[in-house]
Amino acid sequence: MSEVDGTPLLEVDDVVMRFGGVTALDHVSFVVHRGEILGLIGPNGAGKTTCFNVMTGVFKPTTGQVRLNGAPLVSRSRHQITRLGIARTFQNIRLFPEMTALENVLVGADARHRTSVPGAVLRLPRHRREEREGRETAFELLEFMGIAGVANQLARNLPYGDQRRLEIARALATGPELLCLDEPAAGFNPAEKERLLELIRRIRDRGQTVLLIEHDMRLVMGVTDRVVVLEFGRKIADAPPAQVRSDPKVVAAYLGVPGDAA
Amino acid sequence: MTSSGPGGGVRRRGNPVVSALRSADDWRLSRLADMRRRWQAIPRLVRIAFGVALAVFFYLLPNLAIPLIPTPDTNFASVLFTVAVYVLVAVGLNVVIGLAGLLDLGYIGFFAVGAYSVAIFGSPASPLATKYPWLMLIPIAIALSMLSGVILGGPTLRLRGDYLAIVTLGFGEIVRLVAVNWSITKGQIGIPSVPAPPGHYPNGSPVFGVIDTRPFYWLALSVVLICMFGVKLLESSRVGRSWLAIREDEDAAELMGVPSFKFKLWAFAIGAGLGGLSGALFASRQGFINSNSFDVLTSMLFVAAVVLGGSGNLAGVTLGAVLISYLPERFRGFADKRFLVFGIALIVIMIFRPQGLIPSRRRAVELADRRHEAEEEATANV
């Protein structure tokens, strides 16, 4: 793997998330370093998506803190966190179905924009500049994800794989420092997974940090620099993939399940 | 492919009437999509010229003796004025319902705020007797109705779907009850001598008088055209995209950086402002308002105009508003039964065409695409 800049980008600091009597995250702490691809794995119900939701402001943790570049994120609203530099995709695709692919990406790009009603009605210079820039960014990202050909199609009409790619393009359009992908390869065949792997590497090469939730062990092992393993809301391992693969605790919790792992 | 209903509804086979109606409607929709494609292929300059010609036609409408269109029992220009006010209401309500996806059942409340603003601050008969000039009353009416939109939206826009609908329904009733009971609005007695727009002919008679209502119609038409243009500008901007994103999936929109509360509040304020403006025009034309003009049923008619015509599409909601305001005047016998007829019409529309008579561009484009795909598939299979 390529070199990782050692400075911490995101710190998850002793986060506890309880829903009634259920503890979904139990004193979870880990750091995402700038420039790395970090895998977040664990069996079903381990708390991976909950962790994403806490980081992106969907849930407010019971206790604990999340910091981006040292700035606390807890109790900030979701759109503020996005604008601070975290973007995500969803386990179940959540595009804007009645908008075109291009418009979906434009909504993402708008996270960087400030035009409001007066600017739009009066067609102020800022509106025009932001529209032009947004379009350029959007086309470039659609190109990057290999779906520029469907720019004018409604998101709901796109094939499944294109929808997944469009979600990543939309997230990238917000200009994130940290891109969180929630099972981006779900439902992909091996060839598509291979292409996705390549894409994730290229996203990192663009200077973005990637946090990846994934079930497919081969994918995780092939692309990540480091892996954090959750089980029942607790962190049980935090190490490079090769080391995690041979960690008896992880094997017991996850890899050892017959017929599941790669 | 052919068996899936365009609206995603269940297509019942076996009922010949239903399937005949559906295929007739499918045909109509494909013509519509065709027209839209051809329209977009026309050079921009020609389209603008056509738009101008259409506007000129509407300006001339009360002067043209076109058979069948004028209303036999009522002054035609006065009917056209009412139609224009309804269109303005529909354009405003479309921002709230069609674009931002917020079901507002109390839109009449903003209409009433606008109407009463003009009456209270302009009429010599109002208890305040401030008698502001008309040109000042309009900004006041817009400002006050926008303010009431923000006051209503501030706490309630955190609610979603049905809950928001119930709260707005309550708001409409609150405004009406205030109008009924407040000493300044004077309930059923109402406020007379609501000022009309200024201007006199050389012979001294007012331009916006009682006898010739055409100036009122021309004024309302101009306001409608300006507001439509403004809404179009909003639609094709960050604001419009944010509204659509919120309508489609509010949580995803938030996570993509859309400050949804802010834009929902804007939608509410703009909708309220347009509603207030139409109320102000209505009051200026009537010259007299009382609490009877602002009941829930009228509020439902407003929503019906938007939903019937095609929520989210300016042409659609305009058609809806025209149907709802013009038909009862053209066919007077029908006026008493209009709630019944529109109720039935709404049910029929909901069954056969949930997106309204002229569905928004997105739907139409999609349907056209699907047909296209189906054709390709068919050719490929041959």
Image: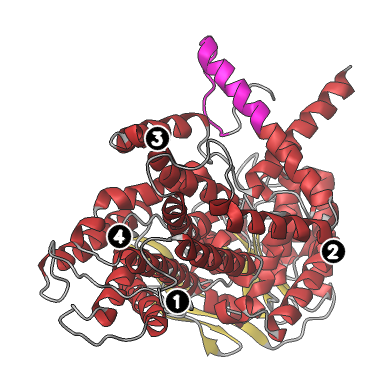
Q: Earlier in the sequence, mark 3 or mark 1?
A: 1
Residue B324 location (% of width, % of height):
42, 44
Sequence-first disc among 3 and 4? 4
Q: Picture coordinates of residue A15 (x, y %)?
A: 45, 75
User: Is B160 above or below relative to B310?
Assistant: below
Residue count near mark 2 (Cα–Cα under 10 Å), binned few <14, some 14–19, many ≥20: some
Q: Is residue B47 magenta?
A: no
Q: Tell me which amino acid carries mark 1.
A: Asn
Badge 1 and badge 2 in a common chain: no
Q: Residue at x 59, y 43 (%)?
A: B359
Residue A7 seen in the current view: yes
Give the mark toward the camera: 1 or 2: 1
The residue wearing badge 1 is B203
Could you give the CA–CA distance between mark 3 and mark 2, rounded to whole angstroms?
59 Å
Residue A93 % position (x, y): 61, 51
Q: Which residue is mark 3?
A: B331
How crowded pointer 4 is (Cα within 10 Å; few <14, some 14-19, many 20+) is rated as many
Asked whether disc 1 touches disc 2, contact meaning CB atoms under 8 Å apart, the reply is: no
Three-letter amino acid code of the residue under disc 4: Thr
Q: Earlier in the sequence, mark 1 or mark 4?
A: 4
Marks 2 and 4, how far apart at CA: 45 Å
Q: Secondary structure at mark 1?
A: loop
Question: Could you say which disc has been placed on residue B168 in the image?
Answer: 4
Amino acid on which the number 3 mark rests in the picture: Phe
* Image point (80%, 44%), residue name: B38
Question: Disc 2 marks which amino acid?
Answer: Phe
Quick one: A116 or A143, which is closer to the camera?
A: A116
1 and 4 marks in contact (CB < 8 Å): no
In this rendering, position of residue A180 left or right of residue B301: right
Name the residue carrying label 2: A144
Range drawn in magenta: B7-28
* Helix, strand or loop under label 4: helix
